[in-house]
């Protein structure tokens, strides 16, 4: 090994130690039980991913992507880290970049919430804002090339940077936390897809462990993931930029793995907002809009279980906290300007909780 090679390895060892030590100091995220009418016989659990230090489930992804880049020798001392993001990943990567002393640049659309931009800057990152969601990939690649940096590319690497067998991934954590419940193997796990990484990890884990649990993936209106899953073809599917931050994409990303998904549900954007607000009323939990999308799917699946008299449990995630969206999805004026009208959908949810019948 050359002298510089030895120095590179020493730096990488130290960077990996810092990331592993951060993990070692951190607690697992809670799996909340959300109370439902007793006679339904259905138990709902939400895993609160907002409590990670960088505020969302992207804390797990960022940790995995940094470790993957380090063990591959792609990230070395002084490497500028560049990422294309709708915001949450950039917040988490800015956190880890600072932890190991690297500069970080996030490429995002101008519509990214100001709260997320502030968080990235608080963690020492820089933001490059573009007009259209479709531009982020090329601009990130370009920025990495011209700065001699490294394009993290979450939309390609999310599905392979996380170990699907276990190693404390989100799926293993869910099953461990359910161990003492009356239905420890859930009927359904419900998630969305931004990179598709979480659904790929959970779907592979379920198959590897030969669980009967089915994986349902929710997708915002106009996203490319749903048509890609229907056709089993990610190459040709296209959609529009998502109005639900964190999930739904104009193209079916390479890290989206349709074959491990048992069921998909398309969710109107206003229904996502309604379910987000409904959760606050029902359980006092203030989550972001993607959690609303997840719950719109969850309530439909629970309605199916109640209609069939099938008992069991169902698990979903709280992806991030509502604090990041005080000036947007939680603001009535902002919603009106976006043409989003959740009231009718909220009425549907109230009716469902009262009667156990879904009038969709
Ligand atoms: C990324 C993200 C998701 C989806 O997770 P993936 O593993 O990328 O599919 C959901 N909600 C929020 C807020 C996100 O940032």
Image (cartoon, rainbow, N blue to C red):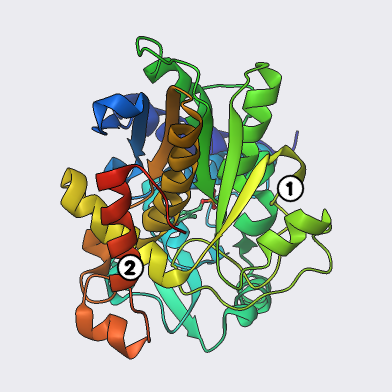
Q: Residues within 10 Å of mark 2 (few under 14, many from 20)?
A: some
Q: Is residue 288 left or right of residue 255?
A: left
Name the residue at 21% across, 61% down. 323
The picture quadrant where one finds residue 160 is top right
Please provide percent x and percent y for residue 317. 40, 42
Q: Is mark 1 within 8 Å of ligand 1?
A: no
Position of 265 relative to 345 (above/below):
above
* Residue at the disc numbered 2: 116
Mark in front: 2 vs 1: 1
Residue 153 appears in view: no
Q: Earlier in the sequence, mark 2 or mark 1?
A: 2
Q: Position of residue 79 (x, y in %)?
A: 56, 58
Q: Is residue 30 above or below residue 232?
A: above
Point out residue 59 in the picture as x, y percentages from the top left corner: 42, 45
On whether ligand 1 comes within 8 Å of the CB at mark 2, the answer is no
Location of the N terminus (image quadrant) = top right
Which residue is depicted at the point 22% across and 85% down?
Answer: 333
Q: Is residue 242 among the parts visible in the rendering?
A: yes
Q: Nearer the viewer, residue 177 or 4?
A: 177
Tell me the residue at 38%/30% (across/down).
23
Residue at image mark 1: 258
Disc 1 crowd, CA 10 A, few/some/many (<14, 14-19, 20+) = many
- Relative vertical location of residue 153 with respect to residue 76 in this rendering, above or below: below
Element under disc 1? helix
Residue 125, x across and y down, in percent: 38, 66
Measure how far apart labels 2 and 1 are at the Cα level. 29 Å
Residue at 73% x, 73% y is 238
């Amino acid at each position: 090994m050359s002298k510089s090679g030895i120095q590179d390895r020493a730096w990488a060892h130290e960077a990996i130690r810092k990331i592993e030590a951060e993990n070692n100091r951190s607690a697992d995220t809670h799996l909340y039980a959300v109370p439902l009418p007793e006679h339904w016989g259905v138990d709902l659990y939400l895993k609160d991913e907002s409590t990670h230090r960088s505020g969302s489930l992207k804390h797990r992804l960022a940790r995995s992507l940094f470790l993957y880049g380090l063990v591959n020798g792609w990230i070395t001392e002084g490497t500028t880290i560049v990422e294309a993001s709708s915001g949450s990943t950039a917040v988490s990567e800015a956190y880890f970049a600072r932890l190991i002393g690297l500069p970080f640049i996030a490429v995002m659309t101008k519509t990214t919430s100001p709260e997320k931009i502030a968080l990235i800057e608080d963690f020492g990152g820089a933001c490059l804002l573009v007009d259209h969601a479709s531009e982020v990939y090329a601009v990130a690649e370009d920025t990495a090339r011209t700065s001699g940096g490294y394009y993290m590319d979450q939309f390609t690497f999310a599905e392979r940077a996380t170990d699907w067998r276990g190693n404390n991934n989100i799926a293993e954590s869910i099953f461990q936390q359910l161990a003492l419940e009356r239905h420890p193997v859930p009927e359904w796990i419900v998630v969305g897809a931004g990179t598709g990484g979480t659904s790929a990890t959970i779907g592979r884990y379920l198959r590897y462990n030969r669980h009967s649990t089915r994986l349902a993936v929710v997708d915002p209106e106009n996203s490319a993931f749903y048509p890609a899953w229907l056709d089993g073809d990610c190459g040709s599917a296209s959609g529009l930029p998502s109005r639900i931050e964190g999930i739904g994409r104009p193209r079916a990303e390479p890290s989206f793995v349709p074959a491990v998904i048992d069921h998909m549900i398309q969710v109107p954007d206003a229904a996502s907002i309604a379910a987000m607000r409904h959760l606050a009323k029902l359980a006092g939990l203030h989550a972001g809009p993607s959690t609303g999308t997840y719950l719109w799917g969850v309530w439909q699946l629970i309605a199916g279980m109640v209609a069939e008299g099938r008992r069991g449990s169902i698990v979903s995630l709280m992806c991030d906290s509502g604090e990041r969206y005080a000036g947007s999805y939680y603001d009535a004026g902002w919603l009106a300007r976006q043409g989003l009208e959740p009231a009718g959908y909220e009425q549907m949810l109230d009716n469902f909780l009262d009667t156990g019948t879904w009038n969709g």
